[in-house]
Image (tube, rainbow, N blue to C red):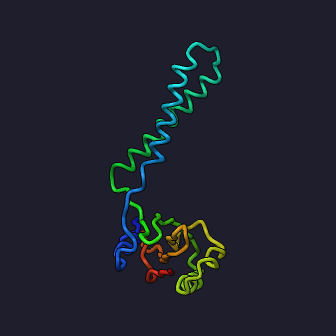
Amino acid sequence: MAKYDMCEALYALPDGKIQPRRKPIAMPLMITLAGAAMVAVNIWVLAGYDMPNLKSALVLFGWVGIMVGGAMLASRLSGKSLAPYHKEDGCFLRREELKFNKDQKTTVLELVGKGDFTILRGVPSDGVSALVVEIYTSPRGKFTAAQTFESVDWEMVPVGEIKIVE
């Protein structure tokens, strides 16, 4: 199913309020280094001790940390892994996707048009993505953008305009 990218419209907002940025690499780097430290402790510190359970746990969690942290690090350093960043708040936007039945289209469009996202989150959702509302919010609550999409011929087509609440 083809997907419409709402981020492109957010990046086109005036004054560059929303910018595409890479997420920081500090956390994946720390996970990788913590895993390597666990493996090093197992090799050098516990070499002469007979503690098979502790040594097995250190090896298991160490290699899992190295693999997960390394994969996260590789994905953040390569490719087009850009996320919307709110310049005024200095933080990345959180993405939320609400799915509804097509019967609720008028209610959903009305709530999105009003910018009343708390009531919209209370509307019973459906597992089928016939009608989808994509919401990007700032963790500090100063910026919210939402748009409604409808599934037409295996594509997600925007139904209304982007509603921005600041």
Q: Number of callouts in the render?
A: 0
Which of these two is toward me, 15 or 111?
A: 15
Which of these two is toward me, 125 or 88?
A: 88
* Side (left or right) of 15 relative to 28: left
* Side (left or right) of 48 relative to 11: right
Where is residue 149? Give x, y as percent. 47, 75
**Dividing the image into 4 quarters, which one contains the N terminus?**
bottom left
- Above-or-below relation of 160 to 128: below
- Above-or-below relation of 8 to 36: below
Where is residue 111? Give x, y as percent. 58, 84
Where is residue 125? Give x, y as percent. 62, 71
- Above-or-below relation of 61 to 105: above
Q: Residue 54 sits in which quadrant?
A: top right
Where is residue 95? Give x, y as percent. 50, 66
Residue ID at (57%, 81%): 108
Residue ID at (65%, 23%): 53
Which of these two is toward me, 121 or 124?
A: 121
Residue ID at (62%, 14%): 49
Which of these two is toward me, 110 or 17?
A: 17
Residue ID at (45%, 83%): 160
Q: Residue 85 sits in which quadrant?
A: bottom left
